[in-house]
Image (spheres, helix red, strand yellow):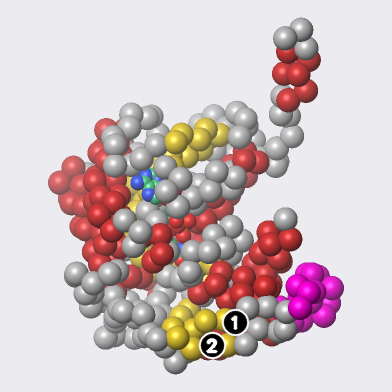
């Protein structure tokens, strides 16, 4: 007990990533729900770098307690463990509402909870925005287009969603969240933005969440088969997470509030072509000595085809004309550069 003051002195944290110094009138108090998740944690990083006060509300349903550990103790940062399904009283200027499990594996674990998160959780956060007069941004999804009959998908397309299939808890949850958001805007004058996010990837994706990039990268690094559901001809467009974060902040800070805005990459490729690209990048990074060699006794991964998954959309590509015209946004990262960063991240993670 006598050593207690010294121990406290030694554990006081003074080193953090650098943040901008903003004048008090420029500094916003920003709530990020789901801020401990994959996208949320990168958004929090950027808002912190920009010098804002950031409050994260996360239940850790699919997030990770370590994604934001580098900010814990920073005077501009606060992490609250809480569920958006319960109302919360806070004073904020902006709300980025991201809380919702995003990988099929996570959102199908408890379909009813996923729906409650999207419906009741969004209603609670809109209620908070109404009370505090905060600007509210909903992270919606390309899944609202379901299995699209229009290609690429513009925001004016209403979608083709199975309302009772295994993915309905997520797709219909987001559709009701959009309806609620515009309901609060029309009825109560809440200042809202809606981002329809298309496939995004990057460091801090969960290694076992079953999403395309994490699945393929982790399998390639472990020397295990890359498993493709179906014949690999389904297409996906991939966006690197830093581009998404730029898009979300640009939309939040823009004056465009009329309709949802697609945020995604038009770099469309078949699932098979992404698997081959990842295999080849892993091979190159190994040859360059940037990541560890294959584990002992393992051979380079092969591609394996499994039965198709129910309601998996065959084609996805955003029409991003609106994003370009209204918020001057388009992706800056090439998929290759993003994939290399992601491969290096997972290689370091698996080596721990
Ligand atoms: P994620 O699962 O990594 O993060 C979601 C976060 O929300 C997690 O930290 C989780 O613990 C938290 N959360 C879940 N339910 C909650 C609840 N009831 N209360 C409080 N916190 C809760 O997912 P992500 O990929 O970071 O996605 C973030 C948002 O972006 C989601 O709303 C998702 O629908 C949307 N989105 C993501 C993508 C993508 O490609 N990553 C694509 C389209 C839309």
Residue 22 relative to residue 183: left or right: right
335 on left or right of 199: right
Front-most of 251 and 88?
88
Quadrant for ligand 1? bottom left
Quadrant holding the N terminus: top right
Horizontal side of 224 relative to 230 (left or right) equals right
Most common secondary structure along the magenta stretch: loop
Asked if one can make out residue 40 in the rendered structure from this viewpoint, the answer is no
The mark found on residue 351 in the picture is: none
Residue 337 on the magenta span: no
Mark 1 closeness class: few <14, some 14–19, many ≥20 residues within 10 Å: some
Image coordinates of residue 239 in percent, x first then y, are: 52, 71
31 lies above or below 347: above
Residue 306 sits above or below residue 190 on the image: below
| Sequence-first tag of 2 and 1 | 1
Mark linked to residue 225 = 1
Is residue 129 something that shows in the picture? yes
What is the distance, in whole Å, between disc 2 and disc 1 at their CAs? 6 Å
Looking at the rendered structure, the secondary structure element under dot 1 is loop
For residue 304, the mark is: 2
Q: Quadrant of residue 91?
A: top left
Q: Which residues are magenta?
A: 282-297
In terms of depth relative to the viewer, which is nearer, 224 or 212? 224
């Amino acid at each position: 007990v006598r050593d207690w003051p010294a121990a406290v002195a030694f554990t006081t944290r003074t080193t953090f990533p650098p943040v901008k110094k903003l004048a008090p009138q420029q500094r916003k108090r920003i709530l990020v729900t789901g801020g401990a998740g994959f996208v949320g944690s990168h958004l929090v990083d950027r808002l912190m770098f920009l010098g804002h006060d950031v409050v994260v509300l996360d239940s850790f349903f699919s997030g990770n307690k370590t994604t934001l550990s580098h900010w814990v103790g920073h005077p501009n940062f606060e992490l609250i463990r809480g569920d958006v399904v319960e109302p919360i009283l806070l004073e904020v200027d902006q709300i980025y509402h991201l809380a919702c499990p995003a990988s099929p594996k996570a959102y199908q674990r408890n379909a009813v909870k996923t729906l409650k998160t999207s419906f009741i959780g969004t209603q609670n956060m809109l209620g908070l925005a109404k009370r505090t007069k905060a600007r509210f941004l909903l992270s919606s999804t390309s899944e609202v287009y379901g299995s699209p009959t229009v290609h690429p998908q513009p925001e004016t397309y209403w979608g083709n969603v199975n309302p009772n299939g295994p993915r309905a808890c997520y797709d219909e949850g987001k559709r009701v969240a959009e309806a609620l958001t515009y309901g609060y805007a029309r009825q109560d004058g809440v200042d809202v933005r809606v981002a329809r996010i298309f496939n995004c990837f990057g460091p801090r994706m969960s290694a076992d969440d079953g999403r395309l990039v994490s699945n393929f990268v982790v399998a390639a690094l472990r020397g295990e088969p890359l498993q493709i559901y179906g014949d690999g001809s389904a297409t996906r467009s991939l966006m690197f997470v830093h581009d998404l974060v730029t898009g979300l902040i640009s939309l939040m800070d823009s004056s465009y509030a009329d309709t949802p805005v697609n945020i995604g990459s038009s770099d469309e490729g078949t699932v098979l072509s992404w698997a081959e690209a990842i295999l080849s990048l892993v091979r190159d990074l190994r040859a360059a000595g940037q990541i560890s060699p294959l584990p002992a006794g393992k051979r380079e991964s092969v591609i394996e085809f499994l039965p198709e998954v129910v309601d998996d959309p065959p084609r996805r590509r955003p029409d991003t004309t609106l994003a370009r015209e209204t918020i001057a946004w388009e992706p800056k990262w090439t998929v290759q550069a993003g994939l290399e960063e992601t491969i290096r991240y997972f290689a370091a993670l698996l080596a721990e």
